[in-house]
């Protein structure tokens, strides 16, 4: 809070005509509401991934042609540790 106040004062010192923007919090009000919202988001994306991945996996597993086409891509991604993807997903998911 103090850091924000210092930045605001520095900005006003540089430009006295600067209008300070005050934004209201638009998120959920309680901690429990935030947890429920996060769980709904995670579970809905999980089920969407299952709906896409399971039929795709079955199709690739049954078709030799699709298996030969998709397998090199899968083998490239297998080399990367799952934890190495976390920063990339964090950056992509935080974009608004």
Image (tube, rainbow, N blue to C red):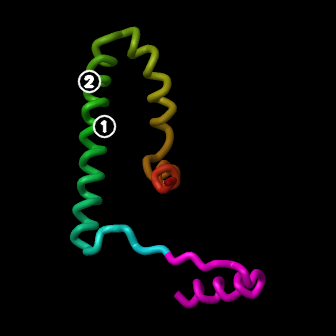
> Closest to the observer: 65 or 94?
94
Give the residue displayed 51% in from the left and 77% down from the top.
Answer: 22
Q: Are there few (<14), some (14-19), or many (20+) residues within 10 Å of tag 1?
A: few
Q: Position of residue 52 (x, y in %)?
A: 30, 30
Q: Quadrant of residue 53?
A: top left
20 part of magenta stretch? yes
Q: What is the span of residues highlighted in magenta in the rendered image?
A: 1-22
Relative to residue 47, is residue 93 depicted above or below?
below
Q: How many marks?
A: 2
* Residue 40 pos. (x, y %): 24, 54
Please name the residue shown 39% across and 13% down the image: 66
Q: Is residue 87 visible?
A: no
Which residue has dot 1 on it?
Answer: 49
**Circle 2 is placed at which residue position?**
55
Q: Nearer the viewer, residue 83 or 10?
A: 10
Question: Can you say whether 44 is above or below 15 in the image?
Answer: above
Instruction: Look at the numbered disc 1 and give the secondary structure of its residue.
Output: helix
| Mark 1 and mark 2 residues within 8 Å of each other at the beta carbon | no
Mark with earlier residue (1, 2): 1
- Farthest front residue in view: 17
Residue under the point 56% across and 90% down: 2
Q: Is residue 50 magenta?
A: no
């Amino acid at each position: 809070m103090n850091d924000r106040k210092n930045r605001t004062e520095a900005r006003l010192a540089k430009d006295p005509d600067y209008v300070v923007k005050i934004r209201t919090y638009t998120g959920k009000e309680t901690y429990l509401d935030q947890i429920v919202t996060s769980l709904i988001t995670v579970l809905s994306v999980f089920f969407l991934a299952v709906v896409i991945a399971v039929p795709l996996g079955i199709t690739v597993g049954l078709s030799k042609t699709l298996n030969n086409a998709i397998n090199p891509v899968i083998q490239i991604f297998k080399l990367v540790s799952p934890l190495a993807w976390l920063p990339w997903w964090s950056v992509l998911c935080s974009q608004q």
